[in-house]
Amino acid sequence: METSIVDVVIGMQYGDEGKGKIANQMAASGEYDYVVRFNGGGNAGHTIYLNGEKIVTHLVPCGILHGIYSVIGNGCVINTQKLFDELAYLEGLGFNTSLLKIAENAHIITQEHIDEDSKDTTIGTTRTGNGPCYKDKVGRTGLRAKDIPELEPYLVDMYSLIHSSPKKFLAEGAQGYWLDIDFGDYPYVTSSNTGVGAVLNNGFNYKQVRNVIGVIKCYSTYVGAKGYQKGDERFEKLREIGQEYGATTGRPRQIDWLDLDEVNEACKMNGVDFLIVNKMDVLRQVDSAWNLYQDQMVISCSDENTFMDRIANYLDPSIDIEFQGQLH
Ligand code: IMP
Ligand code: MG
């Protein structure tokens, strides 16, 4: 029987891998009927360049930028005011926001959630109310999209949406696998699952997952309270050239070399078919920066090709790797 399929874009590091760019390229292909966000909320910041214009979204899936139906899935948490502000911003840019759908059972971020999150000093959260909202969801005291009259026109039921007729979905992840509530460096994590399992918890069955596209940068970044960056002046250069500042909070991202073991584990845990390696052009602009971690040791590669070969040889050979930001 014909069924819906879903291709999934997931970050394999700590967020900010360039998922937004990749999801945007894929949405632009015309292959998909729907783009769906399956986790997170306004804590995410997706930066996209469309016809030379920089567009930053937090909650609305990138399908809206391509005239495709876009769904905020039930795994997401929604700040209603911020959502309406973002819709107004996108309408102002000429996009048709009536294509937006919201899962009726997605949870709502309240002022109390934001107030509670604003007191955080240990995790270094985005202070958007994300964690406290998920806490109420799991505690069964939360408010859902179907409880909010203003969201009525957008509401959908994920079962009907996915299973009533065959459609092609692109699932756009938020954050990255190493910020996952279960598998990340707890407590320095976000409050949702960020991997492929989260897609299933938005109503897709496992047979519908077609391709999993993992996204990384050719170096690592992390934003949050734990100490992550080591003293190496090349990291400061990387931050400036790569413009590594949080899209949501403006905080400087901490930087380190690419960690191949981390990427390898994330690929295995998510069944990655394709891996995109972003920002090669940034690493190229810093002297002697073709470095990566393997078995917790820094390996210095002599040049770009050696660096690319080492990645390809280390990961499962069935993974199709594409490097972006190359000279040719
Ligand atoms: P929260 O998701 O706001 O609770 O923040 C928890 C941790 O996840 C903090 O270290 C944040 O900086 C990080 N985080 C949350 N969303 C993103 C994101 O979209 N990109 C990068 N880091 C994020
Ligand atoms: Mg981001």
Image: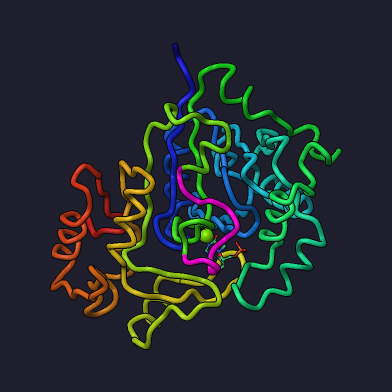
Position of residue 173 in the picture relative to residue 296 (left or right):
right
- Evaluate whether residue 155 shows in this view: yes
Q: Between residues 7 and 272, which one lies in front from this camera angle?
A: 272
Position of residue 16 in the picture relative to residue 111 (left or right):
left
Image x and y of residue 135, in percent: 70, 56
Q: Which colour assignment does the render follow? A: rainbow
Q: Between residues 169 and 261, which one lies in front from this camera angle?
A: 261
Q: Between residues 141 and 8, which one lies in front from this camera angle?
A: 141
Image x and y of residue 281, in percent: 30, 65
Give the vertical position of 322 relative to 115 (above or below). above
The quarter of the picture where the N terminus appears is top left
Residue at image x 38%, y 40%? 212
The quarter of the picture where the C terminus appears is bottom left
Q: Which stretch appears magenta?
A: 185-196
Position of residue 103 in the picture relative to residue 288 (left or right):
right
Give the vertical position of 187 relative to 105 (above or below). below
Report the number of discs.
Answer: 0
Image x and y of residue 318, in percent: 21, 42
Give the vertical position of 288 relative to 21 (above or below). below
53 inside magenta stretch: no
Which residue is most to the top?
Answer: 1
Which residue is most to the right?
Answer: 149
| Secondary structure mostly seen in the magenta stretch | loop
- Evaluate whether residue 53 shows in this view: no
Image x and y of residue 178, in percent: 44, 60
Q: Between residues 66 and 172, which one lies in front from this camera angle?
A: 172
Residue at image x 68%, y 36%? 103
Residue at image x 57%, y 43%? 37
Position of residue 292 in the picture relative to residue 36 (left or right):
left
